[in-house]
Amino acid sequence: MIPRGAGTLILVLVCWWMWSPRVGVDGDRWRVTFLDVGQGDSAVIESPDGQTVLIDGGARYERFDMGRGVVAPFLWNRGIDHLDHVVGTHQQLDHVGGLIWILRHMSVGRYWGNGVERSERFSVDLSAALDGRQVPQSIAVRGGDLLQAGPCRLRILSPWEGGPIGREGGHADGTTLNNQSIVSRLECGAHTVLFAADIETDGLRRLGEDGRRPVTVVKVPHHGAKSSFDRGWIGEIRPQYAVFSVGRGNSYGHPVPAVLHAYEEERAAVLRTDRDGAVWVTGRLSTSDVTVTRMRDLLLQSVDPSQCLWRCERENWRRVWTQFLDRFA
């Protein structure tokens, strides 16, 4: 039998877990979360007025689907049951594979792609999911606004109209596909977040003025690959935070040391999903403050009573309290 006190605590925790934090949308707070989807990309934007954008969904493997196993549980935990916009930055498995499950099982207002179609199974399944759920579709083109939420705007910087490949991209090489990535820039209050997808060096040089201005946060292009390394571009955007969405021990060697060093030289705080887990950035329109949180910092740590009892336990309680507060952010 569960003691009365313990039963009450369990009930409180369950109610807290089930309570939707999005009830408290206040028109002021915004949040961007970079999910840990292994060797892939996935980010969620929550605007001050409650609109939501999912950019990529990680990969879909035979035994594990990032959309079902990582992205959807995160959305449910945040109280998100409808996505206003879903963006598939480009037709590669590690970016859009996980979106198939999301599109099949969640309410989606609009899907944004780059107009490229491929013959691979994941691409066929993605198209079938969109058609089956009758999700409205748009092709992203540089200069358009994907989202407008009061003073917050998500502007498309790439691909440019009349780019190197059209709808029949089935035989395009990886570089061509990467340079057709949907790159977007979120401006919210005093801060800017640049989502650089997998765009490579040639594509970076075509982003135009909006893609070369300083930013608060950059999702580093192409997981920190050498093919997307442009030291001059990094010096122009001068990010305060550089987020590497990368899988632990990946076979590609991402991120390469030269890219890491370049961001460190610009005094950017380097964040890596392979080491830090999910990373989220929270700000307000009413202030210039921004908060960056790593999942790694919130995980409870084992305590050795002989070495560190009270201080380590105090740190664990701090982590619990931070997670509680995050439910309201």
Image (spheres, rainbow, N blue to C red):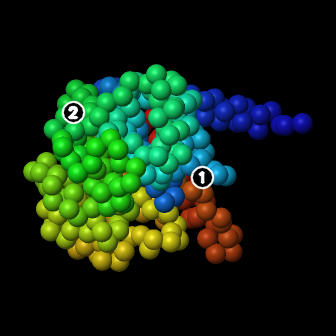
The residue positioned 33% from the left and 41% from the top of the image is 167
Location of residue 328 by image quarter: top left
The dot on residue 314 is none
Q: Nearer the viewer, mark 1 or mark 2?
A: 1
Amino acid at circle 2: Asp
Q: Which one is earlier in the sequence, the residue at label 1 or at label 2?
A: 1
Quarter placement of the N terminus: top right
Q: Which residue is mark 2?
A: 145
Where's residue 252, x and y in %?
A: 45, 71
On screen, residue 86 above or below 279? above
Location of residue 89 by image quarter: top left
Residue 5 versus residue 250: which sits nearer the camera? Answer: 250
Residue 199 versus residue 132: which sits nearer the camera? Answer: 132
The dot on residue 61 is 1
Location of residue 221 by image quarter: bottom left
For the image, the number of numbered tags is 2
On screen, residue 22 above or below 190? above
The residue positioned 15% from the left and 68% from the top of the image is 232
Quarter placement of the C terminus: top left
Where's residue 176, x and y in %?
A: 30, 57
The crowd level at tag 1 (other Cα within 10 Å; few <14, some 14-19, many 20+) is few
The secondary structure type at the circle numbered 2 is: strand
Residue 190 versus residue 214: which sits nearer the camera? Answer: 214
The residue positioned 26% from the left and 28% from the top of the image is 149
Visible in this render: residue 23? Answer: no
